[in-house]
Amino acid sequence: MKPPRISPKRLALVFILVTLTWCLILARFAQIQIVEGARFQELVSRQCHGEFELTAMRGAIYDQHGKALAFDTPSESFFTDAHDKKQLRRIGKSISRITGETGLTGRLLSRAGSFNWLARRTDPDQAKEIKALSLDSVRSHEEYKREYPYDNLADDLLGEVNSDNIGISGVESLFNELLKPKPGRAAFQRDGFGRVYSTSEIPLVKPVDGCAIQLTIDCEYQQVVEEELKRAVDKWNAKSGMAVFLETGTGRLLAADYYSPVGEDAKRQKVFKSRIVSDLFEPGSTFKIVAFAGMIESKLYSLSDTIWAGMGEFKFNGRTLHDDKEHGTLTFRRAFELSSNIATARFCQSLGGKRLFKFARQFGFGQKEGIQLPGEHPGVLRKPRNWSEFWTAQTSIGHGVSVTALQLASAFAAIANDGRL
């Protein structure tokens, strides 16, 4: 039997079809490899490779004796970059039961395939529970949590950090650029199902710890100041109180605190400002040291010079000033000892408004102290258009003036330091 004869035309047609098929395959191959090679390479890299941030330790804060007031401790954080939404729902539901974050699942679904934090800076018990779940595509890496070993001690000065360990108030904010670490970066790889299977042990960029700083604060003095301030505020049923403790010879701030009974039960109150340099108040009779120091410096009176104290009231430019007690004739010394408003104001008329203003400025009022705390206010000490008797009278007794606690403490420290501010 003769084999079937294949027509030459058919052979030519098959040859042409096979040749065209291979040409199309080669053309597609060229398109993928040459024309669109960079795009597909980027797509593969994005799907199979990723990077995450490596954090370092934030710098510690020490008191003048080297006792740590704030420092970082290692803690575990968990993340995922899963693509599958069914898997993300399972992860979100399981992790939220432990962390209490109600919107976790929704956040994961809206960022499917992206790097997502699941729980940051967990405590050991939380970390143990999350690991026990053995969830696919859930990875952990070490971060750092800010610790304050003395709890609320000096919190008005130290301030606090936010969830990203960035200073938002107090010393933590002011020196944030020094304290904050320089983060590094590490790479990880995924398989075809989006599961992370390899994390580089060698970082792409090595993290660098933040710088430590040392304050003039004395931890032991700070504890005493806070206890005594609380006792005084509670004793006199005050709404709040501030205390400043300075070293008179150097002006170094050894301790300072703000206390208010409101919100005392909170474990750690939110701190937004350093009140000893930001809160203003009228100094009242404590400001009389400026008037008396100015008069003594100007050698206007001896301690035995006398003046009429008006028996409780006296007019200056037609406006009446009062004393809480009726005083008759008082010596210069007794006027200061009794803190008589009228006697102080009358003695100060010889000093005059211009010189009183000058001495107040020399004591540091109406200007910033220059201390390295955020939010410092210069206070209020206005230069009047007319140097009237009444302006001199009210300013000499601390009315119409606003100061910070640090300014007032510095003025008294200058008296204790033989007049040197």
Image (cartoon, rainbow, N blue to C red):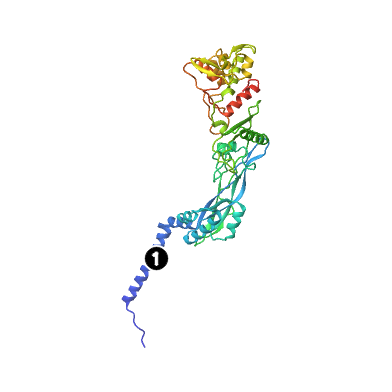
The percent position of residue 178, horizontal first and vertical second, equals: 58, 38
Q: In the displayed structure, would residue 20 be above or below residue 73?
A: below
Circle 1 crowding by C-alpha within 10 Å: few under 14, some 14–19, many from 20: few
In the displayed structure, does residue 162 sit left or right of residue 247? left
Point out the image quarter for the N terminus: bottom left
Secondary structure type for disc 1:
helix
Q: In the image, what residue occupies the spot 41% across and 57% down?
A: 36
Type of amino acid under label 1 = Ile
Can residue 364 be spotted in the picture? no
Q: In the image, what residue occupies the spot 39% across and 65% down?
A: 25
The percent position of residue 166, horizontal first and vertical second, equals: 55, 42
Which residue is tagged 1? 25
In the displayed structure, does residue 228 sit left or right of residue 189? right
Of residues 266 and 185, the one nearer the viewer is: 266
Of residues 304 and 164, the one nearer the viewer is: 304
In the displayed structure, does residue 22 sit left or right of residue 403? left
Of residues 421 and 256, the one nearer the viewer is: 256
